[in-house]
Amino acid sequence: MDYDALMHTLRQLALEAGDKIMEIYEADDFDVRSKSDESPVTEADEAADALISAGLRLSFPNIALVTEEQSDTHDLNVTDFLIVAPLDGTKEFIHRRGDFTVNIALVESGTPKRGVVYAPAKNRLFYTLPDGSSVEEIGPFDKAQAGQVTPINVSKPDMSALMVVASKSHRDQATDDYINRYQVKDSKSAGSSLKFCLVATGEADFYPRLGRTMEWDTAAGHAVLNGAGGRVLRLDDLTPLVYGKDTFANPFFVATAPGIDLTPA
C-alpha cells in the first residue's frame, strides 16, 4: 500500500465531502428520512457517500469498500478494506449542533491503520500521516496540499482525577454507572468520532461506549487514536477491538490512553 497516496486521497475526499455537507447544513431546510433500522439519514449523508465512494473506487479499485450508506457492502467477508461513515453524527447534524464528522479509514488485518476524521462545522481535521502517527491540521484547509499540522498524543492519566468524554446523543444510565467506577475529575460530552479525537489529543483520558455502534462509526477515530498512542478495547474482556466482524457491528468498548486500570463491563 502506498500510504502517501492513500492519505492524500483520504484527506482530499474528506474535505470535499465536508464542503458538500456544509452546503446542505447551512440551507434553510433539508430532507430527513428513516433507514430500515430506524436511524435517520439525510441528503447530506447520501451526497457525501456518493462523492467519497466514487473517489475511493477510482483511486483504489482493488481494495474492498464498506460504507454505511450502501447496504450491499455490509455482507462482505473481509479483513483488509476501506470503510466510510460519510456523515457520522446524523442526529447532531439534524439538530444543528455541529458535532458531526466525515470518517474514512483503512483497515488491515482487522486493525484500523490509517484514517481521517473531519468535523467541518467545528473546523477540526485529524488524520494519520503516512507513517501512522497522528496529527491535527490547523485550518484553513487547502484540498490540494496539507497545511500546518500539530502532532497529537494521548494524556498521561491521573487515576485520582480522570477526564472522561461520553456520547452527547446516546449517554445512558449504564454509561454513567461505568464512569462512576472511576475517580473522575471532569466529564464532557461530544458527538460522533470527535470523542476518539479528544482522547487522542489528551483533552480526555478515556471514552466508554456501552451502546450500539458499527465499524464505520469507529474505524477512522480508532486509527487516529492508535496513531496518538491510545487503544480501543472491548469492554467484555479488555482485548483489542478488531474489525471485519459479522455485519460490522461492534461490542461495547472503551477508547483510552494507556495507564488506566480498567475494569470489564
Image: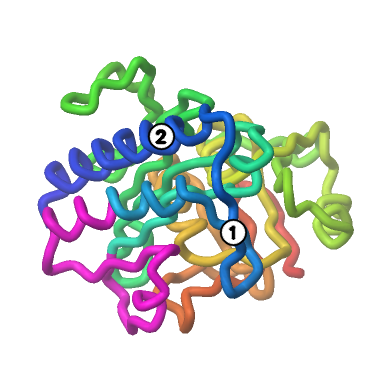
| Residue type highlighted by circle 1 | Arg
Which circle, 2 or 1, is nearer the viewer? 1
Secondary element at image label 2: strand
Q: Residues within 10 Å of mark 2 (few under 14, many from 20)?
A: many
In screen coordinates, is 230 left or right of 265?
Answer: left
Question: What residue does disc 2 label?
Answer: 126
In this view of the protein, which residue sits in the foreground, 201 or 39? 39
Secondary element at image label 1: strand
Q: Earlier in the sequence, mark 2 or mark 1?
A: 1
| Residue type highlighted by circle 2 | Phe
Colouring of the image: rainbow
Image quadrant of residue 100? top right
Q: Which residues are magenta?
A: 52-81
Q: Which mark is residue 33?
A: 1
What is the C-alpha distance between the residues marked 2 and 1? 29 Å
Which residue is located at x 85 percent, y 42 percent? 183
Residue 150, image x and y in percent?
37, 22
Is mark 2 in CB contact (under 8 Å) with mark 1?
no
In screen coordinates, is 124 left or right of 158?
Answer: left
Which residue is located at x 18 percent, y 24 percent? 145
Tell me the quadrant of the picture where the N terminus can be found. Answer: bottom left
Tell me the quadrant of the picture where the C terminus can be found. Answer: bottom right
In screen coordinates, is 240 left or right of 143?
Answer: right
Residue 241, image x and y in percent?
51, 67
In this view of the protein, which residue sits in the foreground, 192 or 197? 192
